[in-house]
Amino acid sequence: MKVLITGVAGFIGSALALRLLQRGDQVLGIDNLNAYYDVGLKRARLARCQGQANFVFVQGDIADRACVEGLFQRHRPQRVVNLAAQAGVRYSIENPLAYVDSNLVGFAHILEGCRHQGVEHLVFASSSSVYGGNSRMPFSVHDNVDHPLSFYAASKKANELMAHSYSHLYGLPCTGLRFFTVYGPWGRPDMALFKFTQAMLAGEPIPVFNQGRHRRDFTYIDDIVEGVIRVLDRPAPPNPEWNGAAPDPASSQAPWRVYNIGNNQPVELMDYIAALEKALGRRAELELLPLQPGDVPDTYADVADLVADFDYKPSTPVEQGIARFVDWYKGYFKA
């Protein structure tokens, strides 16, 4: 099938494109290649796909309405995976309007393209950040998520609501995936694993927020991609048992669903650092800092719905995933 991936030069987008190409799908990718982080890394990710007969890349911004309209009209994708977004909790505190352009305006353009071209299924990236002030663990898609702690989280919650309205009004099947701390080879330089590795190899201290008392449901990139593909292949169905008197936040009478994709095994940040120390063969110097605005102390994914509906559960151990990242990092940067 022909799949449009937005944010195709990103960490998840490029890995997903490779997997879809390997199984014989046609992949149309769009990315604005912005300078939020190293554009060279984005181009290197893209290079893994370029040159393949079934891959078409368009450099453009989903916030550009005419660009998105033309993309859908010319290429007519059957299914869409929206991964383009301004990422980062802390950056959303400094520059919230960047999130309006990409995560809200851009996503509205994608919804419109899907509606007018009769797309069979829209899968879009949400985030574990939507759980915000929730403290009941593990985080369940059946819990209310109306208390985001960052504008990034609010924009992802808004995406879920926007998609639901299109599912209800136009019958567009939509599935939102709440990703939990994705890591692995070709990852983002603004993420902790990348920063920690860079600092440790340079002999510099690593910043450890919340005095190291974080717990995160770290999820390996290959597990994320496998989950996205399984979901993409089965358009969201309506829930015939949905009841407006006791509404389930994870489903609807419309063809709309939300799932967590996480490892279902939260790891203490200090244990994560210990695994990185082992992989690098050196000790980390820690700079202990307070909890940052917008951060949550813990994340822990309830993946029962993913298991029930797709017979799938992420399973890569953190030690294995970190070792693979370190091997990639040393090779890519010749460290």
Image (tube, rainbow, N blue to C red):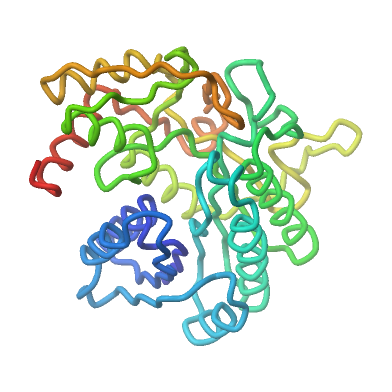
Q: Tell me residue 134's x, y (percent).
A: 68, 22
Q: Residue at x 9, y 41 (%)?
A: 335
Camera-side residue: 118 or 61?
61
- Residue 326 in the figure: left or right of residue 8: left
Q: Residue at x 16, y 31 (%)?
A: 201
- Residue 73 in the figure: left or right of residue 270: right
Q: Residue at x 26, y 48 (%)?
A: 186
Instruction: Identify the image quadrant of residue 328.
Output: top left
Q: How many marks?
A: 0
- Residue 298 in the figure: left or right of residue 47: right
Q: Tell me residue 100's x, y (percent).
A: 66, 58
Image quarter hosting the N terminus: bottom left
Camera-side residue: 322 or 246?
322
Q: Tell me residue 60's x, y (percent).
A: 46, 75
Relative to 58, residue 323 above or below: above
Q: Residue at x 50, y 49 (%)?
A: 87
Relative to 87, residue 134 above or below: above
- Residue 110 in the figure: left or right of residue 88: right
Camera-side residue: 312 or 38?
38
Furthest residue toward right: 245
Relative to 301, residue 52 above or below: below
Instruction: Identify the image quadrant of residue 283.
Output: top left
Q: Tell me residue 325's x, y (percent).
A: 22, 36
